[in-house]
Amino acid sequence: MERNRPKTIILVPAYNEREEILRKTLDTLRESGFPIVVIDDGSEVELSLYLNGLNGVTVLRHPVNLGQGAALQTGMDYALEVGAEAVVHFDADGQHDAREIPALLDTLTNGADLALGSRFLRKEDKVAIPWARRLLLRGARCVNFLFTGKWLSDAHNGFRALNRKAMEKIRITENRMAHATEIVALARKASLKIVEVPVHIQYTDYSRAKGQNWQQSLNILLELLLNKLF
Amino acid sequence: MNLIQIILLVGLAGTMVLAFVILRNQLIGRLFFLGQFLLGGFFVIFPDITSKLAKKLGVGRGTDLLFYLFVVLFYLTALVFVAQIRKLNRQMTELARQIALLKK
C-alpha cells in the first residue's frame, strides 16, 4: 500500500541513452507513482530537451560526464535535500522491472537499510543471464567479498534501494563503475543492514552491448586497488 | 647484496611513504624537488664524483648510478602526480555536482 511506504524517489542515472529507450523506461516508472529524478551525466544531447514537461520527472544535469557512481550520488544528495525517506536506483536502459520496486521497498520497511537486487536467488533469473556475464559476475562476487567482507550472491546489480539512514552514512566517491563495491563496503563500515532481494533482469541486444566486458571488469578491480593506496 | 641494491630497495619501498609526506606537506615537497635540481647540477659540475660514488656503492659506472637514481625519482614523481590528479578529480566532481543541484 502506497500510504505505508516512506516518501520514495526513483533515481535514474543516464548517459547518452537512446530517446525511445529512456522514454519507455520512464513511462513504466511513472506507472509506479513515485517521483522520478533523471540524472543526465553530461550526455552529448541534453536529456532535458526531450524530457522537459514529463509529469513526475525531474532532470538534474552534470555539466561534464563523471560516471554512474557520481550520478547516483548527485541524485541522493538531491533526495536528501528534499526530505526523501528512501531512494531506488534504477537503470535507464530498461533492464530493470519497475514492478519489482515494491519488493525492494518492502525489504526496507522490514528493517533493512540497503536492499540489493540479485539475479542469483531464483532459478529463472539466473538462467536469463548470458553465460559470459554470469561467469564475470561469479568472479565479481569474489572480488566484492575480498574488498568488503560481505558475501553477496550478486555483487554488481544496479537495482537497489536505500533508506535515509543509508543515504546519510554512504557517500559514493567512486565516480565510475567501482561504486557498486564501494556502496557495500561503506554500508558494512556503518553497520547497516544489507538484504538481497530476487529481481529479474531483462537482457536485450541493446543492453547486452552496454554491459561489463572483461576489460571493464579488470579496470574496476584495478580502480578498487588504486583507491586502497591513495 | 651490495650497497646500491639495498639503497634502491629502500628507495622503492620508501617511495610510497615519501610521496605521502610530500603530498601532505607543501614545504617538504618543494625542498625535495629543489634538492633534486641542486644534486643534478652538482653531478654535472663534478662528473667524476659519480664514478667514485658508483664504485663505493657497487655499481659499474657513474652513468649507471645516475640512471638507477633517476628510476626511483621517476616513480616518486609519478606517484605524486597521480595522487594530485585524483584529488583534482574529486574536487571537480563536487563542483559539477553543485552545478547540477543549483540548476535543477
Image: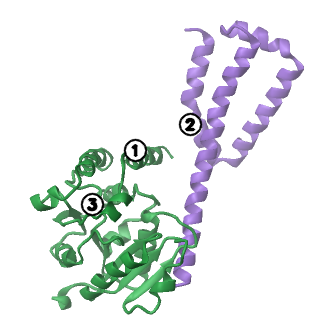
* Image x and y of residue B12, in percent: 57, 27
Q: Which residue is rendered at x = 58% and y = 15% of the image?
A: B5
Mark 2 to mark 1 CA distance (whole Å)? 27 Å
> On residue A191, which mark appears?
3
Does the CB distance between marks 3 and 1 fall below 8 Å? no
10 Å crowding of disc 1: few (<14), some (14-19), many (20+): few
Which marked residue is nearer to the observer: mark 2 or mark 1? 1
Badge 3 marks a residue whose secondary structure is loop
B53 displayed left or right of A128: right
Chain B: its colour in the image is purple
Is B30 rendered above or below residue A33?
above
Amino acid type, callout 2: Val
Tell me, by letter, which chain the rendering colours green: A
Q: What residue did someone put label 2 on?
A: B17
Chain of the residue under label 1: A
* Image x and y of residue B56, in percent: 70, 7
Is A100 rendered above or below residue B3?
below
Q: Which residue is rendered at x = 49% and y = 79% of the image?
A: A47
State whether discs 3 and 1 lie on one chain. yes
Amino acid type, callout 3: Ser
* Image x and y of residue B51, in percent: 78, 10
| For marks 3 and 1 on the same chain, the one whose residue lies earlier in the sequence | 3
B73 displayed left or right of A124: right
Q: Which residue is rendered at x = 69% and y = 26% of the image?
A: B70
Outermost right residue? B45
Name the image quarter holding residue B31.
top right
> On residue A218, which mark appears?
1
Mark 3 to mark 2 CA distance (whole Å)? 31 Å
